[in-house]
Image: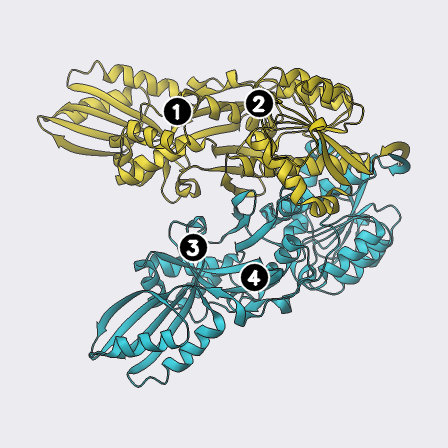
Chain colours: A cyan, B yellow
Amino acid sequence: MNGQTVTVADHVRVGLLGCGNVGAALARLVDEHADLITARAGARVEIIRVAVRDLAKPRELKLPSTAFTDDPTSVVADPDIDVVVEVMGGVEPARGLIEAALRAGKPVVTANKELIARDGPELLRIAAASGVDLLFEASVAGGIPLMRPLRESLAGDRIRRVLGIVNGTTNFILTRMTEDGTTFADALGEAQRLGYAEADPTADVEGFDAASKAAIIATIAFGAPIGPDDVYREGITQVTADDIASARSLGYIVKLLAVAEEVGGDVAVRVHPAMVPVQHPLASVRDSFNAVFIEADAVGELMLYGRGAGGNPTASAVMGDLVDASRNLVAGARGATIGELVAKPIRPMADAESPFYIMVEAADRPGVLAAIATTFGDHGVSIKSMEQRGIGADARLVFITHRAREADLTATLDALRHVDVVTRVGSVIRVVGEED
Amino acid sequence: MNGQTVTVADHVRVGLLGCGNVGAALARLVDEHADLITARAGARVEIIRVAVRDLAKPRELKLPSTAFTDDPTSVVADPDIDVVVEVMGGVEPARGLIEAALRAGKPVVTANKELIARDGPELLRIAAASGVDLLFEASVAGGIPLMRPLRESLAGDRIRRVLGIVNGTTNFILTRMTEDGTTFADALGEAQRLGYAEADPTADVEGFDAASKAAIIATIAFGAPIGPDDVYREGITQVTADDIASARSLGYIVKLLAVAEEVGGDVAVRVHPAMVPVQHPLASVRDSFNAVFIEADAVGELMLYGRGAGGNPTASAVMGDLVDASRNLVAGARGATIGELVAKPIRPMADAESPFYIMVEAADRPGVLAAIATTFGDHGVSIKSMEQRGIGADARLVFITHRAREADLTATLDALRHVDVVTRVGSVIRVVGEED
């Protein structure tokens, strides 16, 4: 035992950077649940300054107009501010502001997925050096408690794999395609009309958003600095209503999955459409809901399900972090850390393994299956099941392979395209969540 | 700001009370993941003493034989012990040992559902008075992080309702009845053969186990002292394969649910079989898995899913708490508390409300439905849907009501039994998870 003196605060003054949907919802929660929060944080938590882009815009917050500023730097530098909450989004100026706050010894709570995916490891290092909390529960899967279970509940467990439905927009689109048989374009249009998808849906439908979240999940789950560039990425724009119907008839649901796993000391992280067995808990995650499925040594299987976006759910997650940071401030302590991040090799996508669903169109005559099957075998890819349906003069063959390496599968597909009876190599979708 | 001096430990010595499945799995985790745990707790965590029932029994733990004792009191009193982990189960002597540890200023981690359900509020009071942690994540839903999200992630949110599948044995039995059409007796026999159910299955199938867990959930979710006696309880022994098939044909799955809600300042807690809509996330929780579905103001809907029992999952939860308690000890702080518990009125079951499924057998002749419908109407119970099937000379009528008070429903059933055309009032099952 050794002794040390720490300073203890009796109330916590918060500087809020950004006051859009999430910021306004947070201010409402802080106001409405003041007693609950005081009981849980061990101190009164109050937002005393708010940095906004447009000072002229009317706000419903119960704060004097003097609390507002359009200079976020002044909020961070204000000696009266104990904790900084960043909900402005984007990389800069958020990055510089958070770094300044951490270096000034102020705990930071942020909902900034893009920034944490890119600069989380560096910011965590700065936070550790300053001995303050950097919390970002809201940056992945909105209101779902994920960072805290990964960091705390599973602190004595070893995580093997995390499978996540972490983008509500694409899950909404795939759910509509699955349940109503609509095309991708129609489902996207519906998502746009309902406000689930942006006018430019690229970040969602091409998997960029999910890839950022996958990087954050992998960083925390495996204690290694993983960035968005380490994540292999495929979106859902190539998924057809036909693929989805075909998957369903085979007992699978198509989802856009973020997959992060540790394999033989390497970390592998990828985002792509996947066929999930209909009995798998992820298969029943519908509409714009998110879920994260964790496989760990001791705990076995765990799934966390909820709203991945929206002002209130996100504010709820920010609030949980703010109570945490406040409580630690009051106690003069830091919260759970993930320890020092240690770089681990990134396994190349070519070495990843999974079963595959493959659709091939070929001439409908004797010997065709033999020719195709030989091509699979030549490349070390073993076929688990096959279904054949006639389509006019041609036949459509749907294969599910046993577990195969990406590189071998790619070689197989290249070779299939040169088999003369093959008229088309159609969709290829990885199968996830089923033991081989 | 005010100053205060706290003592800080640099390593944490654990006394383990009980060394069955969970205790042995915990010791293995502490040994295998020593570096991970040190990084996360900020100190080396070591089990240095273990209280067992039978000193002669061979153990696989990597500890000197001098570490073992059959006197748990000596472990708690040992000045070298910083944290006490209780995994012996049962009310006494666990209760006295935990109380002694807390009063001596030692944080306690326990997996003891029975004890926490009964005496949790009092032990939390003692822990608060001593300024130490009392953590019991493993006491409900095994490895699923539930207490921590309720206490921390949702610290700034208001929980309205919690629905839980918290007993793996009954969920296994109901899954077999649903998917294989087996009888309750056959499914119970299978559960017993597989080791999911005990020779005397009363605690599981009559809902006592779930009621204890419901009491703990309600206590933490609503910050009020709720005991097992406050929980209305019905088991699954009266659920027939017929009910389950009938529910399925109407789009429902039958589950044993723990329901805890706050309604108009009252707390209502109950355990009973319930029909859950097939699209509800709880409907796809199969076999012996557990899940807890939370409805809160800001976060909306949240579900936490995983293994509710078993040595490893339970040890994983204990380990998370132990890391938490150790980190707080190192920092000289306490973890998140739920604040002081405040007694709230318990809403009597007679005032609870839900839609109901009711099966009635009656003579198959004109005017029968009118007579039955009149009886419902006379008692203020409104019918939402009805299905009729002939069974020989009689007809079987299945009703789903709109939301109705328990007391009104009971009065309706009593009256139905006196309607002369009614030959039998069969199963009555509450519908949960569907807006009226």
- Residue underneath mark 2: B89
Lower sequence index among marks 1 and 2:
2
Q: How far apart are the two marked residues, 4 and 1, measured between alpha carbons? A: 42 Å
Q: Which residue is mark 3?
A: A435
Closest to the camera, between mark 3 and mark 4, is 3
Q: Are marks 3 and 1 on the same chain?
A: no
Give yes or no for contact between labels 3 and 1 (Cβ–Cβ under 8 Å).
no
Q: Residue at x 38, y 49 (%)?
A: A279
Parent chain of label 1: B
Local SS, label 1? helix
Vertical comparison of A58 with B290: above or below: below
Q: Residue at x 40, y 20 (%)?
A: B200
Identify the amino acid type marked 2: Gly
Q: Amino acid at mark 4?
A: Ala
| x and y, in percent, of residue A172 in the image | 45, 57
Q: Secondary structure at mark 4?
A: helix
Residue at image coords 48%, 24%? B209
The reply to whether residue A70 is visible in this rendering is no
